[in-house]
Image: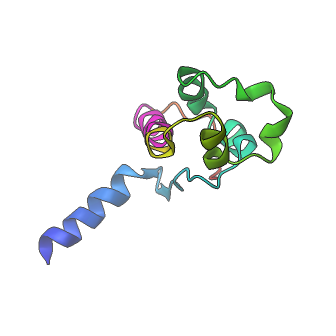
Amino acid sequence: MRDAFLSQILYIYKHSYIGETVKKIIKDTTIKELIEERPETIEVLFKYGLACTGCPASFFEKIGDMAEVYGINTDNLLKELNESVLEGNKNGENSSLSKL
C-alpha cells in the first residue's frame, strides 16, 4: 500500500510544473495545439522528418492521424513528445504554463 502511494506521488511530481499537473500529449492532440502550447516538441517533429509548423493541415490534423499517414510508430512519437515536455519542465525551459 505504501509503495503504491509513493509511486503515485512520484508520478505526480514528475508530471508537474510549479504545482500544476501537465496534461499528456495524446494521439488526439492536434498539431496546432502541440506547436502553440508545447513549442519545445518541434525538435522531435523535425527528428521524424515532419515539417508541421507551416502546414495548413496542422490546424485540424491529430498527432495519431499524422503518424499513421507518414508511417511513424505513434507510441514512440508520443513517448518522445511527452519526454521533451517533461525535460523542458525539469530544466525550466517551458515557454508556457498553459496546458494542452
Classify residue 4 as left or right of residue 42.
left
Indicate yes or no whether the magenta region holds residue 81. yes
Could you tell whether 92 is left or right of 65 in the image?
left
Q: Quadrant of residue 37?
A: top right
Q: 11 or 33: nearer the eye? A: 33
5 to 38, vertically: above or below: below
Task: Spot the residue most to the right.
Answer: 56
Q: Position of residue 54 (x, y in %)?
A: 80, 25
- What x and y, as percent, mark residue 17? 47, 48
| Closer to us: 24 or 56 | 56
Q: How is the image coloured?
A: rainbow
Residue 4 is one of the magenta-drawn residues:
no
Q: Quadrant of the N terminus?
A: bottom left
Q: How many marks?
A: 0
Q: Please state the horizontal and vertical placement of residue 41, each as a whole percent of the image.
A: 57, 32
Q: Nearer the viewer, residue 24 or 88?
A: 24
Left or right position of 3 against 20: left
Q: Give the main secondary structure, helix, strand or loop, of the magenta stretch.
A: helix
Residue 40 image-quadrant placement: top right
- Give the residue at x 55% y 50%: 25
Considering every residue shown, the one lying at the far bottom of the view is 1
| Front in this rendered view, residue 52 or 41 | 52
Name which residue lies at 46% across and 56% down: 19
Residue at image location 78% in from the left, 38% down from the top: 58
Q: Which residues are magenta?
A: 80-91
Residue 84 lies, with reference to residue 61, above or below; the image says above
